[in-house]
Amino acid sequence: MPAASDVECQLHNALPDKPAPGNANAQPRKNLAHRVIPASRGARFLCIGTILVVLVLLITFLAFWFSADALFIVPVLRTTIPGKNVDPAQWTRDGTVIRSVPNWIIDMSVENRNKFAMTVEDLAVTAKFATRENRNVLFGKPTAQQSRVTVHVPAKEETDVKIELDVHWDLADHEQANALASLLVLCGISASSLPAALNVPDELPDFSRSTPGIMKWDLDARKVTGFLGLGMTPPPGELVVWDQVHGAASGWGGRVHFPEDWTALAVCPNSIANARTAAAPSEHIVRLANLTMQACEETGKCR
């Protein structure tokens, strides 16, 4: 083969080398840190600081969540009539409705044992009392003005709340009529003295198998919040011994089944009745029994 001429060699050497494929627009590579963290030193410190704050808040949030405790609630039923050795209530009648005058009070203590404040929004409390095992009847509901209250409890503190209670029973409603009849029996009225429609042995207080008359509290709230709005809202339910909800993020717990929780002690302290006593009923309880009898006889609507 003939050798290349000097002119061809000079032309070949003058041509530039072709760039390697893919390297024409190559840029210096950056690692992940350079891509995420700003180049500016001030912005870099701000970014790192923000990340640390978020991590601290997240860890704190989780720590509070797993260590959160339900509120410790202690409601007590009280009369609004001042003085000692006086009848705690007076009674009026309107048709089949028997009403307490004046209203009663739920004197409630709400203790927050957490390290953060808590707020209970639109709290509703209903007072009931037990007549026999697994049977509770109505005592009263909050008045229309206080049907829902909001309670704020600072960390490691206790807040007192007074809720006005509307106490009345409509004898034309079977459940309410049974509640009033049960209260009369608890306060010393003989079941045989009740109107026939209300003398239902299977529904009246049972002193042989349980301790009737213990107050029961049903609670409900639209929202319960803690640290940074942490949701701790329990479902509507009955107040239970606090140990049953201790360590839970939500629940209705507190002190129950103490002497102050006995309905008869609040309504008829001068004639606390049980199956073994023959104490005479208080005058206001006798009046309540008479109004009940009149309502049943005059309207014929007792159920």
Image (cartoon, rainbow, N blue to C red):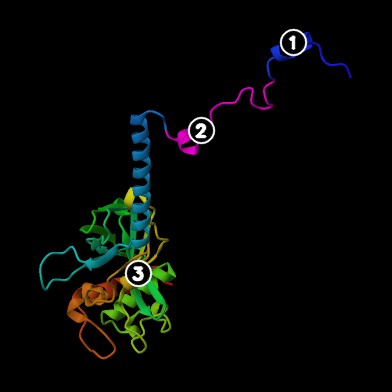
Which of the two residues, 6 or 274, is positioned nearer the viewer here? Answer: 6
The residue type indicated by label 1 comes to Leu
**Which residue is the site of mark 1?**
11
Q: Nearer the viewer, mark 1 or mark 2?
A: 1
Callout 2 amino acid: Lys
CB atoms of marks 3 and 2 within 8 Å: no
From the viewer's perspective, is the residue at label 3 or at label 1 nearer? 1
Q: Residue under circle 3?
A: 295
Label 1 and label 2: CA atoms lie apart by 40 Å
Question: How far apart, in angstroms, are the residues tagged by discs 3 and 1?
Answer: 126 Å
Work out whether mark 3 precedes mark 2 in sequence or the reverse, and give the earlier one: 2
Chief SS of the magenta region? loop
Q: Secondary structure at mark 2?
A: loop
Which residues are drawn in magenta?
18-37
Considering only vertical position in the picture, is 56 above or below 220?
A: above
Q: Amino acid at mark 3?
A: Ala
Q: Is residue 201 above or below residue 21?
A: below
Q: Which residue is mark 2?
A: 30
**Residue in the picture at 33% in, 57% down:** 64
Drawn side of residue 280 relative to residue 66, left or right? left
Q: Secondary structure at mark 3?
A: helix
